[in-house]
Structure formats: C-alpha cells, structure tokens
Image (cartoon, rainbow, N blue to C red):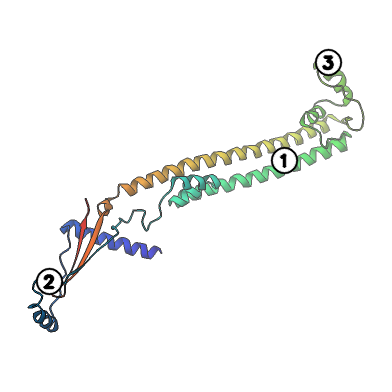
Amino acid sequence: MIPMMRLFENFVIITCALVLLTFELPAVTLKNAPLQELLASSISHDFKNVSLAVAYDSDQEFESPNSTVGERKISLVKAGIYSALLPGLGEYYVGHRSKARIFFAVEAATWISFLTYHMYGNWKEDDFINFAAAHANASLEGKNEEFQDWVGFYVDIDQFNSLGRVEDPERPYLIDNDENHWRWQTAKDQETFRNLKNRSRDAFRRRDFMIGLAIVNRVVSIIDAVRDAKRSQREIKGSDFSLVRGLKYRVEVDPFNQERPLAMSLYKRF
C-alpha cells in the first residue's frame, strides 16, 4: 500500500510541475499511418460536416497528495480517544512515532512502579502485623490505621486507657480482651514495629502517586495528540500542492483528425 501511495504522489508531483509550466498539456500527436490516411480520405467526402471525435471528461477531480482522498484523514477525536486509552497511542496515530515511544515508556514505568509499591506495601504490612503478634501479643488483622497507630505509640493498652484518654478524652475506652490487647516487651521492638508500619504506608502512598501520574500522563498525551492532529490538518490545508485541487482531465479521440487524433488536457475549475 505504501509503495503505491508513493508512486501516486510522484506521479501527481510531476504532473503538477508540467501544469504549472504550461497550465495545459500539449496535445499528443500520433503519426498518421497509410491505412488511416486512406480511410480518412475515403469517407471525408460524405462526412465533411460530421465530427466523430469522442471526448471523455473526468467526473472526479484530482486531489493533492496531502488530501483526504486516498490518504488517511487525521481525526482530532480519534487522536484524543487513543491517548486517553493509552498515552502515546494518539501520537502514534498522528504519525509522531518517537514522541509516542516516550509516552509508552512513561506509562509502562508508571504501572510497573505501581505494582512494585503495591506488593512491597503488602509485604511490609504482613511483616508488622506478624511482628506485633509475636512481640506484643497484638491482633492487628482487620484493624484500621488508627488502632495500628495506637499500638505503635503506647506501650500497652493500660497506658492508652490512662495516659491516652487524659490527653484526649474523646478517645474510646478499650476493654482489655483478645481483640484489643497489646503489650510491648521492649522499646526496641516497638520502634521496629513503627518502622515496618511506616515503610508499608510509605509504599502505599507511592503506589497511589503512580495512579495520579498515570492520569497526568494521559491528560498530557491527549493535549499533545490533539495539538499535533490540528497541526497536521493545517499542513494539509496549507500544502504547496493545494493548486492541484480541482484539476480535471479531458481525453479526446478523433481518428479522422490528422493533426490531433488523440489529445489529453488538464484544466482547473475556478
């Protein structure tokens, strides 16, 4: 398909050059054969006032190589939708392959980072839950982040109910049972728990940031693809080959015309 289009473009360019020089192709004159001369002389006596010329006018106009006929029309809507689905796909559709690769790379790096931080956050979450169960006899499965912070800040549940509620009377009073109990053996163990918990939450925050980055990458790609599509449309409308638009051709065949038995002309409709 591409070689055929290039061949067609070369043909149109050459034709345009000839048109601009002469604005009408000269007639193609064929050398009369003896048989043709004999036939013409034999019937010219009876058909002096009859013209047997046959003319064919093209119904369709010539189009420039940058027109939408025979060429891929750049659509602003498609460019935007493609970039919304996959950043860089709109640029690839417009024809900016190098720029598209950059968006593809950013998108791939974003989701790889998202999965990496997600898995790392889950691993650290399992670590601090298991660590609290082993060193503080705490049950953190299914507990919210606020309860996890209480376990990391207070040595045990008694300190939380006494010192904690003095500082903040609105806090609930926790009954010391299997669901709420914790008591750290050493301060170092409690510090280790906080570090594991903070690493897990930091990984989840970075994971959420990757989602925001993926959204930003899409927005930037949409704006860039639509802008490139508009620029491509302007280049098509402002092409140097715009003079070729509207050209038509006419073929005339007259076997009894000794001067011009065959002629082809190009003309422009104004």
Looking at the image, is mark 1 or mark 3 earlier in the sequence?
1
* Percent coordinates x, y for residue 184 in the rendering: 87, 30
Q: Which tag, 1 or 2, sits closer to the chain's start?
A: 2
- Give the mark, 2 or 3, whose residue is nearer the N terminus: 2
For the N terminus, the quadrant is bottom left
Which of the pair 167/185 is nearer the observer? 167
Find disc 3 in the rendering and name its residue.
Answer: 166
Given contact means CB atoms under 8 Å apart, are the residues at marks 1 and 3 in contact?
A: no
Q: Amino acid at mark 3?
A: Val
User: Image height check: is 160 above or below 138?
Assistant: above
Give the residue number, with chain letter if any, for mark 2: 50
| Kind of residue indicated by mark 1 | Gly
Residue 187: % across, % down: 83, 29
Crowding at dot 1, Cα within 10 Å, few <14 / some 14-19 / many 20+, comes out as many
Tell me the residue at 75%/40% (across/down). Answer: 124
**On the image, numbered disc 1 is attached to which residue?**
121
Marks 2 and 3, Cα distance to the nearest angstrom?
A: 120 Å
Q: At 84% across and 22% down in the image, what residue appears?
A: 172
Asked if residue 87 lies left or right of residue 125, the reply is left
